[in-house]
Image (spheres, rainbow, N blue to C red):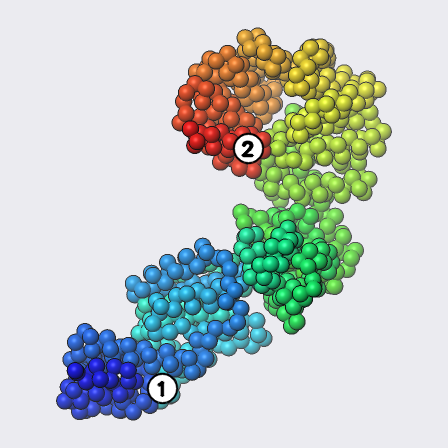
Amino acid sequence: MSRVADVGGAGFGVLLRQLRLDASLTIEALAEASGVSVRGIGDLERGRRATPQRGTVAALASGLGLGVAERERLLAAARSGRNARHGASGVRAFPRGIDDFVGREEELARLTALAEQAALGLPVVVAVSGPPGTGKTTLALHAARELAGRFPDGQLVVDLRGMDDTPPGAAEVMLRVLKALGVADRDLAKAGPQGHPELYRQVLAEQCCLLVLDNARDEAQVRPLLPSAGAGMVVVTSRWMLTGLESIHRLLLGELSPADAAAFLTALVGQERADADPVALAEVAHRCAHLPLALRVAGNWLATRTGWSVRRLADRLALEERRLDTLTAGDLHLSTAFDLSYRQLTPTAARLFRLLSLVDGPDVSAAGAAQLAGQPLFDAEDTLEELVETGLLGTDQDRYRLHDLLRLYARRRMHAEEPAEDAEARRSVLRRWLLDTAVVAGRWYEPDHGAPPPTWQGTVDLSTAEHARQWLQAEGANWLAALRAAATAGDHVTVVEVAEALHWFSDQWMFWGHWPEVFRTAAQSAQALDDPLLEATHLNYHAWALLICEGRHRDSVDCSAQALAAAQRAEDLTQQGWAHYYSAWALGLFGDHDAAAPHNREAARLFEAVGDLHGTLQARANTAQNLQLAGQQEESITEALRTLAFLDQAGDRIEPHIADFTRAILQMNIGLAHTELKNWSEAADHLRTAVELWRSSGNSGVESRALVRLGDALLAAGHRDEARDAFTECVSLGAAADPSRLTEARERLADLDTL
């Protein structure tokens, strides 16, 4: 048996000495053969230096003339020495709190893939950033433990104390890492402070280790610590996004998914308590905003209060004004985590952060934030980006969002630092801007309006109808809240002005879900103004919303009757015509075709009498639809074709969006009539045309209806693959689709899968 086997369990120094003696070499001879100094070899054999660098071990192995097996034995002994040293110094100790790690599968998979990339010999740097409390450190430590086998030279964790007033500089951190990696004090002294950076890079290049730089302050602190060569991996965690760092991978953490949040709470409180009231558990997770730190606090609270039910904590967290105070367990305070980031903000950013708690909707644009803060747009964008950089604000497609707990924290800071009258004034400015902009945007779709007037000085791009539509939809929750506030304040003129401007636009976004409220509120404001014409107008709009948005046919008929009475009091023939039109539409959909017909004829007569071309067009289209619903398919097709000819003849006298909408409706009705007649080819052609028209106008709600009808026609004709494509396209529209049609499309696809 060779001497190598005899000392297989010995330390590196003992093994090195035995191998040298086996080779019949003196220390001086080995030094000459390997290039390692006599003093260095002597220190290694005596154990004065327990963790040689990888390059040193390779040089010694070459000088000794070792074979593959002996070389690996020497390398293993060196690694063993490093691991023992690391354990003794506490560098590899993992804090409590990662044993109950839950979720983050995608993030862990990406870190694993990057670790494999590091094994190819290229250093990998990953910056893990996110708001306070998202579990950045926990993820990094969990990943380090999971990936330990890929980094045989060890895993080091260094707290950069980025939230401290005076965090350690790069030089101090380098020295700590070098010592943790076993570099002798003598070598450190020889290199001197000016040589430590080069020594640091050399050591990392020779080690296959994973270095976690936790809680980084900024790029200047981190940049000198990043390796330029080697097979190692560095994971940097920071509340800041560290956008100045180049050639790194980025991992942005957010909240946990609802399922993972519930699983995390369950791990903390126990399966039995979680199973006793899963609804309450989900409420606790939701009110913690699925934020890991908040979930841990809530879980610890329950774990130490065994007499409390999960429901009791859920109800306590339901009180927004007390939620942050409730999320405290011992010395663990959620608000403290927020305080650390808030104190790092500039005064301008801190003020905007506070004011963002006044936003009614879930998010805000840069233009809205500028109104709120009273800043020029570009200055507001810079301030918002500071908040994003510090992890206090999320961003997605030019929208900015405070998550729920940070919103509560911002509101608390606002009450503490912002005069109440100043805050209310800023909120009023934002709401006024939202309503004014909604009027200008909505009028793109109104006859006799279109593009903004030359005198309009806006801070958002409304240069096209599509831009106007995008703005109205993105800001929907915010301008709706502003409309509610105007109604509550008794600003009835503004309410009816906004609703009027959005009347024709509502066809473009009919399944939003709030049009009944918008037009009901406007009708109530019109009544408060004691204006029967406005009342009739908005009651008619409300009748449409009840009919199309909510499918409440009878309620729509009742509302139309109220509109007719108000229009008669106002002696306004146009609104009388619209009241009859909506009555006919509702009765036709309800199946009472005999009652619908006279209403539609009266609507057509009144529209013609006052020269309302748009009303006449709609009455004619409604006639075609009612004939189709009544089973008179041939007559319906004939009337629809006549109406299309009328539309073509009217040309630009019809507002373009109204013309496109009506043309698509008529094509869809013709397609439905051919479907009833089993003229499958003709039905599919017209329904495809309707789909294309809806798609080109961006009206996904009605497009989803046409897609389902197209799929049904294709399926009836035996074209299963084409039908599947139509149903799949409908499902792909997601939340923008008509919810009932979305359900139908999914059911059709499920049926196709079972056949």
Left or right side of 158 for 588? right
Numbered tag placed on residue 743 in the rendering: 2
Quarter containing the N terminus? bottom left
Using the image as rendered, state which of residue 301 and residue 630 is in the foreground.
301
Q: Position of residue 146 (x, y in %)?
A: 41, 65
Residue found at x 41% / y 57%? 110
Q: Quadrant of residue 380?
A: bottom right
Three-letter residue code for mark 2:
Thr
The circle drawn on residue 384 is none
Q: Which of the two labelled residues, at mark 2 and mark 1, occupies the earlier sequence position?
A: 1
Q: What residue is at 37 percent from the left and 74 percent from the top? A: 154
Question: Taking 135 as reference, is 737 above or below it?
Answer: above
**Badge 2, how many Cα within 10 Å: few under 14, some, many 20+?**
few
Contact between labelled residues 1 and 2, with CB atoms less than 8 Å apart: no
Q: Amino acid at mark 1?
A: Ala
525 sits left or right of 709 in the view: right
Residue for point 68% across, 41% down? 479
Quarter-of-image position of residue 386: bottom right
The residues tagged by marks 2 and 1 sit, at their Cα atoms, a distance apart of 69 Å
Element marked by disc 2: helix
Dot 1 crowding, Cα within 10 Å, few <14, some 14–19, many 20+? some
